[in-house]
Image (cartoon, rainbow, N blue to C red):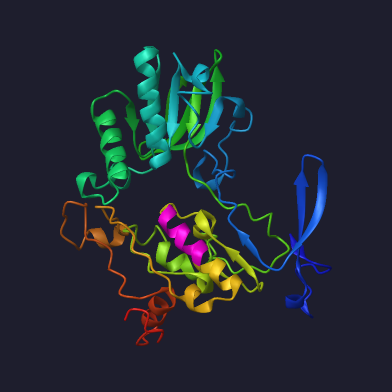
Amino acid sequence: MSRWGADKVVSKGRELRPFMLMVETTSGQRRDTARAVIDASGTWQTPNPLGVGGLSAEGESEFRDRIGYGIPDVLGRDRDLYAGRTTLVAGAGHSAANALLELANLSESAPDTSAIWTTRSTDLVRIYGGGDADALPARGELGSEVKDLAESGRVRLVTGFATTAIREVGGRLLVDGQTKDGVLTIGPVDRIIAATGQRPDLVLTRELRLDLDPWLESVKALGPLIDPNEHSCGDVPPHGHRELSHPEPGFYTVGIKSYGRAPTFLLLTGYEQVRSVAAAIAGDMAAADAVQLVLPETGVCTVPASFSGSASKGCCGGPAAEAVDACCVADAQAKEGGKAGCGCSAAA
């Protein structure tokens, strides 16, 4: 997409030009125009590679036909690919947990099915979650079930493993990875599930003027509040059309794509984002600015490693991240800069 008759460089009269969208259909391509654009294209189609450092592992492209990304349909369409085989699942998030639980279920009807679970981190507090303390019962149950799966030995868990290479020996795969003790080889396995997260596809908006967080690739205003290097306690303050806009007038990023590479997005956040943006486009600024967002507690918080040594350990493995005392993103940023707040009085 672009502006009609203007690429990213052109400034004069830019805001007066409609958006131009190149749309591909079953009958070919066509050009459409729009007054405003909401990018809710997500990140699911652009998974992170299996390798360490955000790059593909050696051999990853060569053996791509034996690697599933995200959450393959283990119990449905893809059943024959996994039944009776050994699968390595890489990742420490909810996608990995779902894949592991489905492989465990598959093993009940296909007894030779087995799984090896590798994680780069040695701390699985975030995936195991808060159990009964989680305000989202299904999320708490998911964490408890995958924890039981690992502790019972039904899957082999290898933590602190960063995949570097995939090799084939005798028709099966060996996976090399870096650990604190040096290189470790896991296998042989028949398939790999890379549940290593997603990243936004920025090709779609290359000709638009965007303001993105430099490392999360999220909407810039949200970056400091969702950065997994700092916290993951579900304490993102309310935000709407103002924070989700860009230097390109009339363009908004919503949904999980607005979080970029951050893994803490909830659908509840997206619903409120879309409501606010739709109201702004319709010209109802009072409704657009009246953002209400209360996220459910996770029951577990993570903090930077630099904080863990000076604080006493509790049920969450350390202190909770500092609460965000703010009515909105602008308010949080103003207070971080030493000001009294944003002055919108939304908290009242």
**Drawn side of residue 213 relative to residue 26, left or right:** left
Part of the protein shown in magenta = 267-275
Locate residue 146: give its quadrant. Answer: top left
- In the rendered image, which quarter contains the N terminus? bottom right
- In the rendered image, which quarter contains the C terminus? bottom left
Is 225 located above or below residue 173 in the figure? below
Locate residue 3: give its quadrant. Answer: bottom right
Give how far across and how far down residue 90 sits, in percent: 44, 35
The mark tally for this picture is: 0
**Drawn side of residue 94 relative to residue 123, left or right:** right
Q: Residue at x 59, y 43 (%)?
A: 45
Give how far across and how far down residue 273 sits, in percent: 49, 63
Look at the image and tell me whether residue 92 can be seen: no
Is 23 located above or below residue 181 in the figure? below
Q: Is residue 22 magenta?
A: no
Q: Is residue 273 magenta?
A: yes
Q: Residue at x 40, y 54 (%)?
A: 264
- Residue 56 vs residue 13, the one in the foreground: 13
Q: Main secondary structure of the magenta part?
A: helix
Is 168 located above or below residue 243 in the figure? above
Q: Residue at x 51, y 16 (%)?
A: 80
**Drawn side of residue 17 relative to residue 70, left or right:** right
Give how far across and how far down residue 37 sits, in percent: 65, 63
Q: Residue at x 70, y 60 (%)?
A: 206
Give how far across and how far down residue 65 sits, in percent: 61, 26
Look at the image and tell me whether residue 155 can be seen: yes
